Image (cartoon, rainbow, N blue to C red):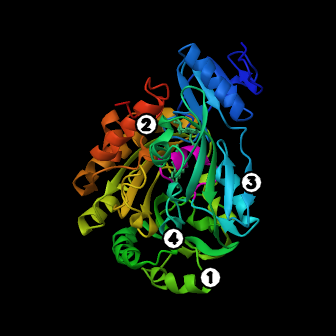
C-alpha cells in the first residue's frame, strides 16, 4: 500500500513490527488496524488524513498511546501514528517550548529542565503530551501554573480535510478554545507551543507513607491541610500496596499503605515549611520527601504502571472529603486482589480554579478533588485478576455515588464508560459549544475514535 506524499513508515499485518506498532500502553487492548501510518512530520499527517478520508477509513490518532481505553488504535482502519514525532525545542529567552504531537512528558521535562524551566505535565513521564493536553492536563504544577491547556499558547493542527492550520487566541479562536479540553475531536495536533516557568532543577518532592490502618485519620488531616495549602504545593494521594521501587525500604514492599506525594514548586526551604504539618499526620512508615531533581521525581512512578500490563479504570469528581466520603474510600481502597491495583486522588484548585470557566473547554475547574480507581494486573494474570479488579473498581465507584460531584475528568474514562459520561464530563453548556465547533471543523465526525463529541 502507498500513500501519496507520505514519507514515513507504513506498517500493516505481516510486517515484522506490526504487533509492536499496534500495541498500546494498556495491554488488555488488542486491535488490528489495516494500516499504521508512522508519520515523520506534519506533511505526512496531512497525507495520511487525506488518504483515510478519500477511502472512508476508520481513523485512530496515536500520540503517547497511553489512553486507558486504547483509543489510539482501531480495528480495520488506519492509525495515524505520531510516536516518532517527539522533538521539543525550547526558547529559553521567550520561555516557551514547541513540542511535537507524539512527544512524551519525559521529552518535555528533559529539554525544559536543561534551562531550569518546566510546564504542567502529568505524573507519569511516559504519558503522551498530546492526549493529556487535549483533555485538560492535570499534574503537580497545576495549582501554581494552571492546567496543561492553560499553558498552551498555540497549536498546529491538521484538520479533517487534511488542511494545516494554526490555532491560537488570534487565529481560529473557536478551534483553540475547543482544543483546550475537547480531546482529539477537532483534528490532529502536530505541534504544541507551551508557556514555561522557572523551576528547580531541585525541588522539594516525594511521598510520605502511612499504614493503611491510619487511612481515615490521614485523610481527615489531609482534607484540612489541602484546603489551606499554598498554590506552590501540588499533592496526589495514592492508596494501595506499596510498590517494590528501589527508593522504598524493602520491608515495606507489598504492605498496604496510604501515601501523599508532594511537589513544591517554590524554594526548597519554603517547601519544608509548607509540608511540616503533613509530616505530622500520624507516624509515617517512611518519609521520602526531600530535595529532588524535578525530572527524576516526575518519572518516579513510571515503573508502577508499565507498558503492556492490563488496566481497567473508573473515575469521578468528588463533592469534597466529608467524613462519610473518607469512610467509603478507606473501606474500598484496599479491596483489590492484585497488588498492582491502586487508587489516586488529585488535589485540584489554586490556579486551575482561577481561570474563567468559559475560557477553555476544560470543565471541572471548581472541583477540589477527583479520584481514579485503577485495576492493574499482568497479562498472564488475566484469568485470576481481570474479573476481580474490574468488579472492585466498579464496586468502589458505585459506593462513591452519593459523594460524587457532577462530572469526571474526560482523560480518565475507560472504554466501557457510557457515551453519556463524555457529556457529563463537560456539562451541557460546554458540550453544546464543543458540538458546534465540531460541526465546523469535522462535520462528518471523521475523528470519532476518541471520547467523542458528536457534531451539532
Ligand atoms: C499511567 C498514566 C498516568 C496518567 N496521569 C495523568 C496525569 O497525571 N494527568 C492527566 O491529565 N492525565 C493523566 N493520564 C491520562 C492521560 O491524560 C490520557 O491517558 C491521555 O489520553 C494520554 O495521552 P496520549 O497521547 O498518551 O494518549 P493516546 O492513547 O495516544 O491518545 C489518546 C487520544 O488522544 C487523542 N490524540 C492523541 N494524540 C493526538 C494528536 N497528536 N492530535 C490529536 N489528537 C490526539 C486521540 O483522540 C487519541 O485517541 C494518565 C494516564 C496514564 C495511563
The answer to whether 364 appears left or right of 449 in the picture is left
For ligand 1, the image quadrant comes to: top right
Name above or below for residue 66 compared with residue 444: below
Instruction: Pick whichever of labels 1 and 2 is earlier in the sequence.
Output: 1
Mark 1 to mark 3 CA distance (whole Å):
28 Å
At 43% from the left and 26% from the top, the residue drawn is 443
Name above or below for residue 291 compared with residue 353: below
- Inspect the magenta stretch and tell me whether residue 126 lies in it: yes
Q: Secondary structure at mark 4?
A: helix
Name above or below for residue 443 compared with residue 66: above
Nearest to the eye among marks 4 and 1: give it: 4
Nearest to the eye among marks 1 and 3: give it: 3
Q: Secondary structure at mark 1?
A: helix
User: Is the CB atom of the residue marked by disc 2 within 8 angstroms of ligand 1's nearest atom?
Assistant: yes
Measured as percent of width and height from the top left, residue 151 is found at 55, 59
Q: Which mark is residue 451?
A: 2
Nearest to the eye among marks 1 and 2: give it: 2
The residue identified by callout 1 is: 268
Q: Which mark is residue 89?
A: 3
Residue 334 at least partly seen: no
User: How many residues crowd around disc 4 within 10 Å: few (fewer than 14), some, or many (20 or more)?
Assistant: many
Closer to the camera in the image, 244 or 453: 453
User: How many residues crowd around disc 1 within 10 Å: few (fewer than 14), some, or many (20 or more)?
Assistant: some
Q: Which mark is residue 144?
A: 4
Which quadrant of the figure has residue 37? Answer: top right
Residue range highlighted in magenta: 121-137
Residue 419 at least partly seen: yes
Q: Secondary structure at mark 2?
A: loop
User: How many residues crowd around disc 3 within 10 Å: few (fewer than 14), some, or many (20 or more)?
Assistant: some
Q: Secondary structure at mark 3?
A: strand
Amino acid at each position: 500500500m502507498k500513500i501519496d506524499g507520505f514519507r514515513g513508515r507504513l506498517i500493516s499485518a505481516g510486517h515484522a513490527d506490526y504487533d509492536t506498532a499496534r500495541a498500546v500502553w494498556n495491554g488488555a487492548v488488542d486491535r488490528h488496524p489495516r494500516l499504521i501510518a508512522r508519520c515523520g512530520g506534519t506533511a505526512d499527517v496531512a497525507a495520511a488524513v487525506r488518504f483515510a478520508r478519500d477511502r472512508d477509513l476508520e481513523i485512530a490518532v496515536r500520540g503517547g498511546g497511553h489512553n486507558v481505553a486504547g483509543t489510539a488504535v482501531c480495528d480495520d482502519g488506519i492509525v495515524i501514528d505520531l510516536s516518532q514525532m517527539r522533538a521539543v525545542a525550547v526558547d529559553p529567552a521567550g520561555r516557551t517550548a514547541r513540542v511535537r504531537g507524539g512527544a512524551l512528558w519525559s521529552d518535555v521535562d528533559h529539554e525544559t529542565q536543561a534551562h531550569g524551566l518546566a510546564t504542567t505535565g502529568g505524573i507519569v513521564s511516559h504519558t503522551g503530551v498530546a492526549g493529556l493536553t487535549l483533555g485538560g492536563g492535570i499534574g503537580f504544577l497545576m495549582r501554581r501554573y494552571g492546567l496543561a491547556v492553560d499553558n498552551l499558547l498555540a497549536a498546529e493542527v491538521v484538520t479533517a480535510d487534511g488542511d494545516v492550520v494554526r490555532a491560537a487566541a488570534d487565529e481560529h479562536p473557536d478551534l483553540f478554545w475547543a482544543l483546550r479540553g475537547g480531546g482529539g475531536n477537532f483534528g490532529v495536533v502536530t505541534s504544541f507551543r507551551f508557556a514555561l516557568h522557572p523551576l528547580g532543577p531541585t525541588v522539594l518532592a516525594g511521598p510520605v507513607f502511612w499504614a493503611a490502618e491510619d487511612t481515615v485519620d490521614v485523610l481527615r488531616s489531609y482534607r484540612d491541610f489541602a484546603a489551606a495549602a499554598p498554590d506552590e504545593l501540588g499533592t496526589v494521594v495514592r492508596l494501595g500496596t506499596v510498590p517494590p521501587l528501589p527508593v522504598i525500604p524493602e520491608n515495606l514492599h507489598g504492605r498496604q499503605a496510604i501515601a501523599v506525594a508532594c511537589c513544591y514548586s517554590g524554594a526548597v526551604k519554603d517547601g519544608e515549611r509548607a509540608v511540616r504539618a503533613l509530616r505530622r499526620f500520624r507516624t509515617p512508615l517512611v518519609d521520602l520527601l526531600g530535595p529532588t531533581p524535578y525530572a527524576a521525581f516526575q518519572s518516579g512512578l513510571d515503573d508502577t504502571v508499565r507498558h503492556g500490563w492490563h488496566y481497567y479504570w473508573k473515575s469521578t469528581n468528588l463533592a469534597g472529603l466529608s467524613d462519610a466520603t473518607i469512610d467509603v474510600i478507606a473501606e474500598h481502597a484496599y479491596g483489590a486482589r492484585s497488588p498492582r491495583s491502586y487508587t489516586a486522588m488529585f488535589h485540584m484548585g489554586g490556579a486551575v480554579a482561577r481561570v474563567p470557566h468559559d475560557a477553555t473547554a476544560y470543565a471541572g475547574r471548581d472541583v477540589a478533588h477527583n479520584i481514579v480507581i485503577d485495576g492493574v494486573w499482568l497479562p498472564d494474570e488475566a484469568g485470576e485478576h481481570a474479573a476481580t479488579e474490574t468488579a472492585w473498581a466498579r464496586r468502589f465507584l458505585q459506593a462513591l455515588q452519593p459523594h460524587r460531584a457532577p462530572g469526571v475528568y474526560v482523560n480518565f474514562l475507560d472504554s466501557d464508560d457510557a457515551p453519556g459520561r463524555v457529556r457529563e464530563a463537560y456539562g451541557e453548556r460546554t458540550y453544546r459549544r464543543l458540538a458546534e465547533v465540531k460541526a465546523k471543523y469535522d462535520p462528518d465526525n471523521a475523528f470519532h475514535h476518541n471520547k467523542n463529541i458528536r457534531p451539532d
